[in-house]
Image: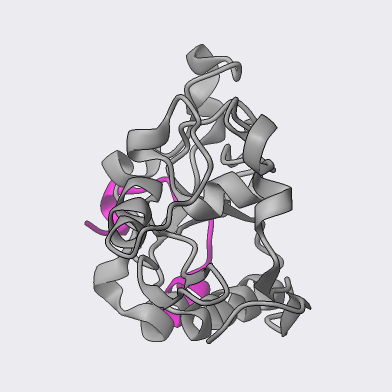
Amino acid sequence: MGNETSACNLSDKAIAKLESAIGKEFVFLDMPHRAVRSAVPAPFPLHEWEKHIPDVVVMPQSTEEVVEIMKIANEFRIPVVPRAGATGLADGAVPLRGGILLDIKRMNQILEIDEANMTATVQPGVGMMELNKVLGRVGLFYPDDPASYPCAIIGGRIGSGGFSLIGGGFGHVPDLVISMEVVLPTGKVIRVGGGGGK
């Protein structure tokens, strides 16, 4: 796992900063890690996956680490594409211009279940099935049921504004999210909306 196996176009300085920010073990330059994250199921043309391989894959675990990644990307003018489960049809997880592929799957903590207000505060890498297992213990559930449900990730559903058949009765994803913490390209963190906990 190193530059010798990578066609990376990022400078050594940018890579070193990424490794310092989140740990070398979570910065991937090798082709298998990069190639597997270069396409989505459909309708993006899978036969063109080689044109859209990210230069590096990073896997942060916290908002603070995402902040550092975005600051580095901003400093070096590197495009960033976030990726969750990449199971949907919105094509938003394809790194069209290479750069940094920000894989959120390590950001998988359920931070708070507020039974009284029927809300959950989660990191974006939480799997929907796992969330509903936890919610089910207190008689609640997250009402979103895409075809990719067993491997769908909350952040990806929010990022793509996902909808499902069950949304006709309970609301689609944009109706279900009451607030978000968002890291801007500059690394600034803002909060959108007025609800939620931690």
In the displayed structure, does residue 114 sit left or right of residue 197? left
Q: How is the image coloured?
A: one colour
Residue 11 locus on image (x, y percent): 52, 67
In the displayed structure, does residue 48 sit left or right of residue 16? right
Residue 186 locus on image (x, y percent): 74, 78
Asked if one can make out residue 89 in the rendered structure from this viewpoint, the answer is yes
Residue 192 found in image quarter: bottom right
Vertical placement of residue 156 versus 71, above or below = above
Q: Is residue 16 magenta?
A: yes
In the displayed structure, does residue 58 sit left or right of residue 30? right
Which of the pair 173/99 is nearer the observer?
Answer: 173
Say which residue appears at 73% left-offset and 80% top-offset. Answer: 191
Which of the pair 164/127 is nearer the observer?
Answer: 164
Say which residue appears at 66% left-offset and 60% top-offset. Answer: 177
In the displayed structure, does residue 21 sit left or right of residue 32? right
Vertical placement of residue 138 versus 146, above or below = below
Residue 32 locus on image (x, y percent): 27, 40
Asked if one can make out residue 36 in the rendered structure from this viewpoint, the answer is no
The tally of labels here is 0
Vertical placement of residue 95 versus 182, above or below = above
Q: The N terminus appears in which quarter of the rendering?
A: bottom left
Which of the pair 155/101 is nearer the observer?
Answer: 155
Residue 167 locus on image (x, y percent): 64, 35
Q: Which residues are magenta?
A: 1-17
Say which residue appears at 46% left-offset and 32% top-offset. Answer: 87
